[in-house]
Image (cartoon, rainbow, N blue to C red):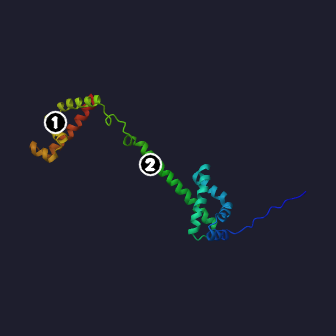
Amino acid sequence: MLFKLKKEVPVHSDGWLIEKYKATGDLEFLGKLYEPYMHLVYGVCVKYLKDREAARDATMQVFEKLVTELLRRDVENFRPWLYVLVKNHCLMTLRAEKSHNLHKEKVLENTDIFMESDIALHPNDVTQEATLAALKNCMEQLKASQKECVKLFYLEEKCYQEIAESLEMELSMVKSHIQNGKRNLKICLENHG
């Protein structure tokens, strides 16, 4: 029986492979350096990301990171340095995912801010006429002082001071009439709207 001997690939140290990669930029050296540690990288990624598919993606992303990081860094002990690189990559991935999820939750909680679906934002002519009629009716039900202050403030866009001077009224009374009038209008519209 004949045995075919495998051609042995020379085993080089991590330091030698790093130096060769830095000198040549040849990804073959980087691949030989990374290959024995892929199981370690994958294991760390699974530990932090808790998802095998995400860990596979992260394992490849770490290799892509090595392409540039090793050129910029002086690495004496590759294994512990790689572990820290992988751990930091996973933590940054989790932080980005958490940030994305928080943003997504805020958007979902505040859909009324982002989606104009409310009838008040899209009134049709019938709804608008009905609202105006109800508003006129409710305005007539206000006390005379409230009605006058609300009219001057909202319809004529006068400031508190101008209203106080034109009605010869204390500023605090003007504020009170506007606040009470607004509240009474809201109650009236809710009951008749």
Which amino acid type corresponds to the residue marked 1 in the rendered image? Lys
The residue tagged 1 is 147
Marked residue nearer the N-terminal end (1 or 2): 2
Residue at left offset 37%, top offset 43% = 113
Which mark is nearer the camera, 1 or 2? 2
Where disc 2 sits, the SS reads helix
- Compared across the picture, whether 95 is left or right of 156 comes to right
Quadrant placement of the C terminus = top left
Q: CA distance from mark 1 to mark 2?
A: 44 Å
Residue 138 x/y as whole percent? 21, 31
Which amino acid type corresponds to the residue marked 2 in the rendered image? His
Residue at left offset 67%, top offset 71% = 16
The residue tagged 2 is 103
Image position of 49 with respect to 79: above or below? above
Q: Which mark is residue 111?
A: none
Quarter of the view holding residue 175: top left
Image position of 172 with respect to 183: above or below? below
Q: What is the crowding at mark 1: few (fewer than 14 residues within 10 Å), some, or many (at least 20)? A: many
